[in-house]
Amino acid sequence: MEEKPIDWRGSSLRDIKDDGIFTPNARKEAGHQLSQVQAGLEPDEWKPFDVVGAGTKEIRINLDDGWFRVMYVAKFPEAVYVLHCFKKKTTSTSKHDKDIAAARYKAVIQERSKK
């Protein structure tokens, strides 16, 4: 099976490369987990996040230097859409982070409906 390409949405690629958001260890782990998703496998630690949009999942990266999250949707055949990458500051995901991911999910759905 061929790997799906990643379609980075909004600032997600910039955010994952930003040392102020993702540490080098978190970035490396996120890359590994996304490679598994591209190959059609599940990440090591994830949870469904359907409140953002149907089929959305959250990769959970918990390291000594922080809690990091990558929200994505991989249910479409053409790509893995990375909606939002961020560092968590509390045990619950903020409304702000959910809203960002939901808006980007909605944009993906709208774009796909025009094809």
Image (cartoon, helix red, strand yellow):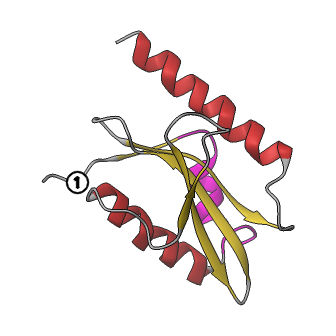
Q: How many marks?
A: 1
Q: Residue furthest top?
A: 114
Relative to 112, is 97 on the left or the right? right
Relative to 112, is 60 on the left or the right? right
Residue pictured at 83% horizontal, 67% vertical? 91
Quadrant in the rendering for residue 3:
bottom left
Which residue is denoted by mark 1 in the rendering?
Answer: 3
**Where residue 59 sits: x, y (%)?**
55, 63
Residue pictured at 65% horizontal, 57% vertical? 15
Quadrant in the rendering for residue 47:
bottom right
Quadrant in the rendering for residue 63:
bottom right
Q: Eyeballing the image, is 73 above or below 19?
A: above
Q: Eyeballing the image, is 62 above or below 88?
A: below
* Amino acid at the residue labelled 1: Glu
Q: Secondary structure at mark 1?
A: loop
Q: Eyeballing the image, is 35 above or below 108?
A: below
Nearer to us in this view, 28 or 94: 94
Q: Residues within 10 Å of mark 1 (few under 14, many from 20)?
A: some
Nearer to us in this view, 102 or 115: 102
**Where residue 92 sits: x, y (%)?**
82, 60
**Where residue 61 sits: x, y (%)?**
60, 74
Does the magenta-highlighted stretch encompass residue 21?
A: yes
Please state the extent of the stretch shown in magenta in the rendering: 9-22
Split into 4 quadrants, where in the image is the C terminus? top left
Q: Residue furthest bottom?
A: 64
Does the magenta-highlighted stretch encompass residue 57?
A: no
**Where residue 57 sits: x, y (%)?**
54, 51
Q: Eyeballing the image, is 48 above or below 22?
A: above
Residue pictured at 68% horizontal, 29% vertical? 103
Relative to 72, is 79 on the left or the right? left
